[in-house]
Amino acid sequence: MHERTSVAELAECIRGELNRYPPGGKLPSSRELVERFRASPVTVSRAVAQLVAEGLVVTRPGSGAFRAELRAGTPPGDTSWQEVSLCGDGGPEAVPRTVDASGVLVTLAAPPPGVIELNGGYLHASLRPERALAAALARAGRRPGAWGRPPTDGLTELRSWFARDIGPALTAAEVLITAGGQSALATALRALAPPGAPVLVESPTYPGMLAVARAAGLRPVPVPVDADGVRTDLLDAAFRATGARVFVCQPLFQNPTGAVLAPKRRAEVVRIARGAGAFVVEDDFARRLVHDDAGPLPAPLAADDPDGVVVHVRSLTKIASPSLRVAALAARGPVMERLRAIQVVDSFFVPRPLQEAALELVGAPAWGHHLRAVSAALRERRTALTAALGRELPALGLPHIPAGGGSLWLRLPGAEAGADESAVVSAALRAGVAIAPGRPYFCAEPPAPHIRLSFAAVAGAAGITEGVRRLRTACEEVMPGSGAGGPRP
């Protein structure tokens, strides 16, 4: 059983039994809980710690754990004034800002125990290099100066590694280490566009980027994506119509469609942006999530960009661990100074132990083995998911089967068939499978209802097959007679 689930289950069991004890009453000892629930001491300790954090339990060193004393009720305060303060117009030049994290939380929130996670945004624990990470962190902690203050731009060796990884023309001086890809995107957008400005985005696109843009007071403008990536004819028109100076894209295994920008369009994207006096923010999040049947990958747009049009984002988080928040921003020219200044103001620097651990990880022999293992495993999981969908849900539209990334993008039959993606998502959760709705991936009105299914976050083929079976149950509940299920074999 996954440790996260076992901790949650044990905490729920203890929580349900708290009423057996009076306030201040002593709970069973850790040893008793270990024996009773057949859990490890670490799991018991973490479950109790969770209840302590919730204020339900208190611990006393040497005495054990006790049910917390009931608190005297306190009258609720009046926080209604905050609505006025947070919404204040700020004058005629004020730019409305919204901070909506719902689209991101769909892939970050852990589903309830027993629910199959087809909505996850990270590799399943079985695919992460946890032993290599632990060894890397241990070695990093022993490096001289490992707990001191790092250079604000990042460790020179790590910046050099990212520069070589992105393209041979880059140098360490053109790389800035950031606390994960999300932080890098936020820094780039704040550096390149003032509040109130339009920013061109692919449609559909990554909800986290849309949230960052809106939180910065920017106005996302959609540019449609097809099987060959962003429509460059529409990109040119969007630049001319809006006067935008930034375009954010994912040329490789785009999220959520999985599209790869076609060779002819790659040069056009940079040429169009250069002609508009604009930057291209290249989010290269999935390069290390390539499947082993993909063939040679195109180089990043930043690898052949002497004029500094492209600001490149590259992260270790997706391929290693959600908690290895280490990424890089690569840029040429005066823009680097602005990126550097925003990074320093926001967070000073990325913790040195994490940077040292990242260096140890990518320099270890286990790194290459990990990349190859993930590449094969993702292809196997993708194949399992597409096969299960073909058997159980053939009426769902699957316009593209990607050779990289960790998810599939599906179109529901349509409103005429009763397809309501919110209803499908809710029914799926009731059936025991978590999926991601398509609406948060659009910054304007979506052309049709969609869902996104992750195969990277599931333990293996058996879990994927069962997840799709449960999804079929949900579709039959919401869209009876629509043909969404199709004939069973």
Image (cartoon, rainbow, N blue to C red):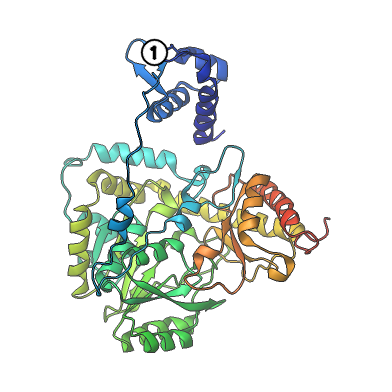
Q: Which quarter of the rendered picture does the C terminus lie within?
A: bottom right
Q: Residue 258, located in which quarter of the rendered image? A: bottom right
Q: Is 392 drawn above or below residue 190 in the view shown?
A: above
Total marks shown come to 1
Residue 364 at x, y percent in the picture = 36, 47
Report the residue marked by disc 1.
64
* Residue appearing at x 52%, y 18% in the figure: 19
Q: Amino acid at mark 1?
A: Gly
Q: Residue 115, located in which quarter of the rendered image? A: top right
Q: Which quarter of the rendered picture does the N terminus lie within?
A: top right
Residue closest to the eye, 73 or 128:
73
* Residue appearing at x 78%, y 59% in the figure: 480
Q: Is 362 drawn above or below residue 10 in the view shown?
A: below
- Dot 1: within a 10 Å radius of its alpha carbon, few (fewer than 14), some, or many (20 or more) residues? few
Residue 15 at x, y percent in the picture = 51, 25
Residue 433 visible: yes
Q: Is 165 drawn above or below residue 149 in the view shown?
A: below
